[in-house]
Amino acid sequence: MYVAVKGGERAIDNAHAWLAQERRGDTSVPELSVAQIREQMTLAVNRVMAEGSLYDPDLASLAIKQARGDIIEAIFLIRAYRTTLPRFGGSEPIDTGDMQCDRRVSATFKDAPGGQILGPTFDYTHRLLDFKLAADGEAGDVTLAEPQTAAMPHIMSFLGRENLIQPEHAGQAVPDDLTRTPLELPASRALRLQSLTRGDEGFLLGMAYSTQRGYARNHAFVAELRIGAVAVEMDIPELGFAIEIGEITVTECETVNQFQGSKTQPPQFTRGYGLVFGMTERKAISMALVDRALRWEELGEDNLGAPAQDEEFVLYHCDNIQATGFLEHIKLPHYVDFQSELELIRKLRREVQSNMCKEAAE
Amino acid sequence: MSDYNFAYLDEQTKRMIRRAILKGLAIPGYQVPFASREMPMPYGWGTGGVQVSAAVLTPEDTFKVIDQGADDTTNAVSIRRFFQKTAGIAVTEATSQASVIQTRHRIPEEELSADQILVYQVPIPEPLRFLEPSEVETRKMHALEEYGLMHVKLYEDISQHGDIATAYAYPVKVEGRYVMDPSPIPKFDNPKLEMAGIQLFGAGREQRIYAIPPYTQVVSLDFDDYPFHPSKADHACDLCGATDSYLDELIVDDAGGRMFMCSDTDYCTTRRKQGHIGAQGVPYHEDAA
Amino acid sequence: MQAQLLEGGFVDYSVEASHAFRAVMTAMARPGEIVQVLGALPPAPMSVAAGVVVLTLCDQETPIYLANRHDTPQMRDWITFHTGAPFAAPQDAMFALGAWDALPLSDFGIGSAEYPDRSTTLIVERDSLSNEGAILQGPGIKDQAQLSLPATQAFQNNATLFPLGVDFMFTCDDRLAALPRTTRIS
């Protein structure tokens, strides 16, 4: 006698209740506020905004809290929320040349107008656990310099003046939107860049690293990495001109890569480009390297069969929300398909075994 | 009801999906690209089916969700709840009472009628994907009706195993043109793909929608000397005694003892209510499940 | 004028559009079946049914072509106000709307071998619509169906293009039928 297993509804309710309790942890420890996450877990918040494709530090912080610090889960929450938002219009392209830079470094020129600004970087910290921080996290006083007001032109523009860097052609006036049209291959560079900027940081890092190690190596120098606030402007049809609707922080990386040329065409450097929401420089540099690797065809290079050159491979696999969903779906019941395989393998085994018996008997 | 729009999706998204569904019906078996939206459930967990259902449902519909044939599996429960919450629609476990049925991996045993719609959740819509990983290449193959690769694969199965070694997601040819993945249903279900109802397939992560209109020719690929055979476990259901239904296999004791029961829980329950009792079954009682 | 323009759309969009789509889907899935659709009151000469189709399926992403008599300022204003759909030449149109003799089939996109779905859907306004005349067979049809078509040869030619080709909706007052490219006509 057998009574069928039921209770999916109750199991789900109980799991959710338990999850909420686990998220809160030990109640004798004060609860984390969204503001604390926003102010003190900024780089996690930035990653969630970048890969969630939604610039909202408060919502990203809430998502991190709700996701118990699981960044991909937090990105997922933001993406799902983003989908429900009405679309009022598109902004004007941001002008990163007008950026209020918190950080600006060039690996190609020792100095340039605007200078090098190290900014708040981990770069030269010794990675020694700071046990003092366990007890006291106050930062101490810092002396603030006057805000930089001098223009800070893109380093690339200096190469451009000498025609040393390949110029980028203007794209469509309104590029396709990855989130509104199905991805079609080959993709325009605009779509590729959209895909990369919301792609998984770890995936892009691995891809970029593989190009450095020789899988479609293209000798990248960071011509410029700049991080700072830029104005977002939107054209208001009723007014007839664009007004500033806000300010966002972005990280931009331009790499200068191996030059091209021939007997008839003077050699020129080529470029890789990365632009990411927030202070996200590992991601922006990775993006620039992968962007450059994907441009092999347009720049007349050989397809070396390297993973980072394979547009379909990179674009179809860089989205961590797609990847994690499909990966984790194998936890779902597959009784039916497994059962069909079970029947098949039993049948095939029976056939082989009976053949072996026959042969043995002969 | 809720703060969300009827059936969650905004109207522009629904229109885009609706247009894709109509083109899918006009070109049976062809995968129509659509700009799949990010849903509040993970990709791979039915986001394609959910988007298609959301575009198709009306407030008067009665909705049924099955996963592996069962209404009570956790993901079926989760999707059913989602639509109860966002569309406020009636739900049912009875196949015959549902106007829209969303399914993962099964076609109900009970024959569907002309006014029913079956929505499939599809993980990998491309039947050629496991033979050719590139989308650019497989799209070309469909365009040229170049399906030799699929036949070679099936034939290699036969030469290696003496039989076609595909037991689920068994490829079909629709209306003599497109080779189509019927989603990972067991091949036992393939003959039911020719039905009176409308069948819609949604693959969210892969951004594809396809369809089979009613009474459309759907042929499981095979060879003259190795004809297609819709097999199932050679048992009767131990709960209701059915011999014509697809069965789940359960391991019931430490010694590896097994029993079989209908994967379609509504079919099994209905039979038990009618007084059918299998080898290990008991008379049906409402509260004992 | 302005008041007229604002009128005639769906009052409760998500619900009315859901009903309308189910009717349109039924028509496309069952060629020859005539369905009733409600909720739109477009300016003349557009039928209620054509208005419902436009409200249900068209928006900023769907270029639409208005043929001859249907290309009036009132129609354009109404469509723009209620859907935002841009107007386009026949070859760029996702939808085309007009009388049969104003819609020469060779003008419209039939899709490409790789993307046969990128073809125009023609909304053909009819003075009458009934289940008599041409015999239809193919996907969606059990045995056979009948529908009063404005022509025979043109639809047969379109069907030979399969999987390419255009798809049709026939509208008359508040009634609608559809004919996808898969239907064989005799």
Image (spheres, coloured by chain):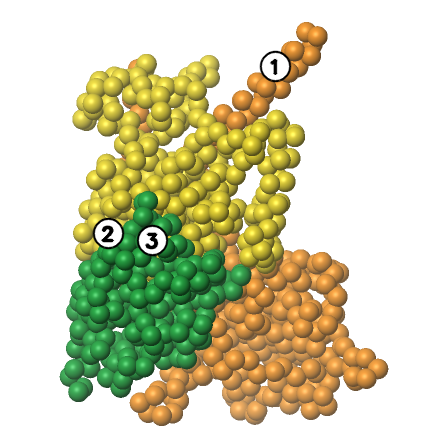
Chain colours: A orange, B yellow, C green
Secondary structure of the residue carrying numbered label 2: helix
Image coords of residue B92 (percent x, y): 22, 40
Image coords of residue C123 (percent x, y): 31, 69
The reply to whether callout 3 and callout 2 are in contact (CB within 8 Å) is no
Q: Residues within 10 Å of mark 2 (few under 14, many from 20)?
A: some
Amino acid at dot 1: Ser
Query: Is circle 3 on the same chain as circle 1?
Result: no
Q: CA distance from mark 3 to mark 1?
A: 53 Å
Relative to the observer, which residue lies in front, B32 or A194? B32
Q: How many marks?
A: 3
**Height in image: B140 above or below B154?**
below
> Left of C115 or right of it: where is A236?
left
Give the mark toward the camera: 2 or 1: 1
Query: Is circle 3 on the same chain as circle 2?
Result: no
Which mark is drawn over residue C178? none
Q: CA distance from mark 2 to mark 1?
A: 56 Å
Query: Is circle 2 on the same chain as circle 1?
Result: no
Relative to the observer, which residue lies in front, B37 or B151? B151
Amino acid at dot 3: Leu
**Height in image: B239 above or below A185?**
above
Q: CA distance from mark 3 to mark 2?
A: 42 Å
Residue at mark 1? A354
Residue at mark 3? C136
User: Does residue A41 appear in the picture of this structure?
Assistant: no
